[in-house]
Image: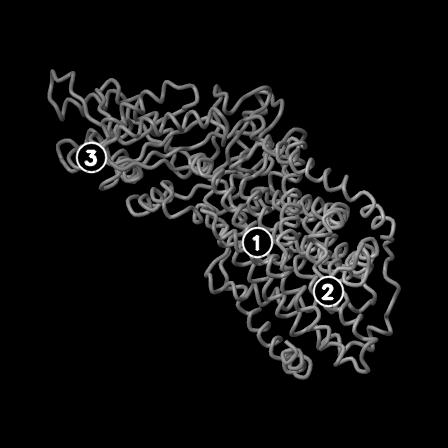
Amino acid sequence: MKKIADFIVEKRIYILITLLVIAGFCATLIPKVEVNTDLTKYLPDDSSMKIGMDIMEEEFPPAPADYTIRVMFKDLTDEEIVSMKEKLPEIKNVNSVDYKEDDKDYNRDGYTKFVLHTVYEYESPEESEIEDTLEKDFNHDGMEYKNDNVDTPNFPVWVGISAVVLLTIILIIMCESWVEPFLFLFTIGIAVVINLGTNIIQGSISENTFSIAAILQLVLSIDYSIILTNRYRQEMPKYSDKRSAMKAAIVSAFSSISSSSLTTVVGLLALIFMSFKIGLDMGFVMAKGVFLSVVCVFLILPGLVIMCTKWIDKTAKKPLHVPTGGIARFCNRFRIPLTVGFIALFVAAYLIQRHTVIAYSISSFDPVAQVFPKNGTIVLLYENKDDEYVTAFADELKEKDCVLSAANYSNTLGKQYSASEMTAAIKELSEGMGSGDQSGFELNESMISLLYIKKFGLGQSDSTMSIEELFNYVNDEVINDPALRPMIGDEMAEEVKNYAKDLNDGIRQLKGDRFSRLILTVTLPEEGEETTEFYEMMYDRCKELKGEYHLIGSTAMNYEMSLSFAGELLFITLLTAVSIYLVVLITFRSFIVPVILVLLVQCGVFITVSIIGFQGYSMYFIALLVVQCILMGSMIDYGILFSNYYREFRKTLVRGEALKKAYECSIHTILTSGMLIVTATAILSKCYGDPTVEQMCKTISIGAACAICLILFVLPGILACLDRFTGGKNRVKA
């Protein structure tokens, strides 16, 4: 290690230039990394829904784009409703407006809902202009609107800037020089740029990863810079020149930084074992980021510190003094009660956190949905040979209160109708096709009766045909027959052609070469007991199908995840704990210290989940898995740092004095790094706007605060209580 330290210090200028060139090149790659907002792309390969979506992509054409904005008004009079029906369609870029006078989905408890349709994508200038018009011209008391964009919002630049500014302020307060914080941020900033640019090797990363990776890399890695700088400051009095002092600091800090970073990397890599592949995405990106940060800290920071030593000395200031003597004495004196209390706290937190509800879906606040709950869509993909069974099953489903509609080819476009039934069927279907650009289409009853007579002859009153067969007959025979064409007329003939084209498009959406789709519109919530019971019923009935089948939809994805989550959480928890235990075991060559540190941080996780439950919130399953790995990997660093100092000082000091010195040497690093991660994630949780990122960051913030409190106020007492096993073989007698 000494030769490496010599090389880093002596070649510091060349190393800095090389890494700046690499960072510059990586910066050009960042815009080329695709940011994916579709979480279904991260479903496991063996997921039934994933397989079904792949089949649908092959079998069926893409559905026509239709972007909607739900607008809700309160206490409109009948005249005002009529006025809104006239004014809303006139908004620029709005194609059509849905409203049904006698439908509770549009009128409820004094509220009125309109659904605006546009062909322009969400967040496009045209769609944004619609929302601007709503706010400007329709924003009277009680008006609310919400678009149906399911993509996560773009990362707000001002949030990132605010987080960095606040982190800089914390560093300035805690560091011993006004210059040091900027050296730290510059060093980690280069690592962040390289990490973001090298994400090109993955092709794309998730929006969630992109949103939090840079900030988390910064806060998870900043303590490595602090550790190295503190070591350099400790070595300076021992050497006559700063280069020799830095070489010694690199050698001395290598063990602490490498072991701390390795636990973080191992914890993050545990995410790759999530069946939901977003874990692979987040785990790899953040683990790579921490590794690159360590590399930059060892390669760049020594040179920067040496070059700026003069400025560091000139801007030296008295650091924030944190008195720790009283805490050290307290932990030493009450070491046995603290140890027993920790055991009780661990058990209690474990039992309490089990009552926190695990959620498999999370969404931002929707004021319109509070009054008019959004309907859900479930797609049953099945083989055509099971069409008869599924059609009968669809009729049964329609009788359920939670099912608004159950449509497949055989009970809509392929359903057989008599002449008397056909008029109403066409009208109903025409209204359904009227959203968007279509204005609807209608054949009167007398014309339909005449068409039936022409096709089947007089006296065939029981003859039936489907809507598809009717329009194919008109389009293929009636329109092209000079004798029959006059009964349709030129204008009607053109409408029939257009409608037949739309009809064929609709058929292709419902029936493919091998598979068909049953599309259910349900009033079920995203998840819950009622939803689970419905899906269990669906799966039980689908087992009777002869061919392959798949259930597709957001609620289907939630149900799939719920079936495997408990086992997955247990596996990842054990994998993370065992992996980190082995890393700490190698570092300390002690069986007890790793156990203490792992249990301590795991207790912090249990407390965090309990707090989320006490606040009345449910715990999003992705957030729990991610937080489990991040806290276990990163917060244990503080425990390693404190334990390392304690064992080092126990070689020459008695137990109480060793605790005091361990506090003095580690408190600034722990508090500085700890406040950074707590503050940065708290800012993201309040300001970001995406509920998934917000809960992950909120949970990390709470978890980090819990873990820091346990490490500062509980760990010292446990180390002192178990000093025989934790103080090292060469410790002095207490």
Relative depth, front residue between 429 and 683: 683
**Residue 175 shown left or right of residue 704 in the figure:** right
Q: Residues within 10 Å of mark 3 (few under 14, many from 20)?
A: some
Task: Tell which tag, 3 or 1, sits nearer the viewer.
Answer: 1
SS for callout 3: helix
SS for callout 2: helix
- Depicted 460 relative to depicted 433: above or below: above
Q: In which quarter of the image is the N terminus?
A: bottom right
Q: Earlier in the sequence, mark 2 or mark 1?
A: 2
Q: Which of marks 3 and 1 is nearer the N terminus?
A: 1
> What residue is pinned by disc 1?
267
Task: Tell which tag, 3 or 2, sits nearer the viewer.
Answer: 2
What residue type is disc 3 on? Answer: Asn
> What residue is pinned by disc 3?
472
The reply to whether dot 3 and dot 2 touch (C-beta < 8 Å) is: no
Q: Report which quarter residue 445 is drawn in.
A: top left
Relative depth, front residue between 654 and 11: 654
> What residue is pinned by disc 2?
227
Q: Earlier in the sequence, mark 3 or mark 2?
A: 2
Q: Any mark on residue 125, and which? A: none
Q: Quadrant of the C terminus?
A: bottom right
What residue type is disc 1 on? Answer: Gly
**Residue 308 shown left or right of residue 555 in the figure:** right
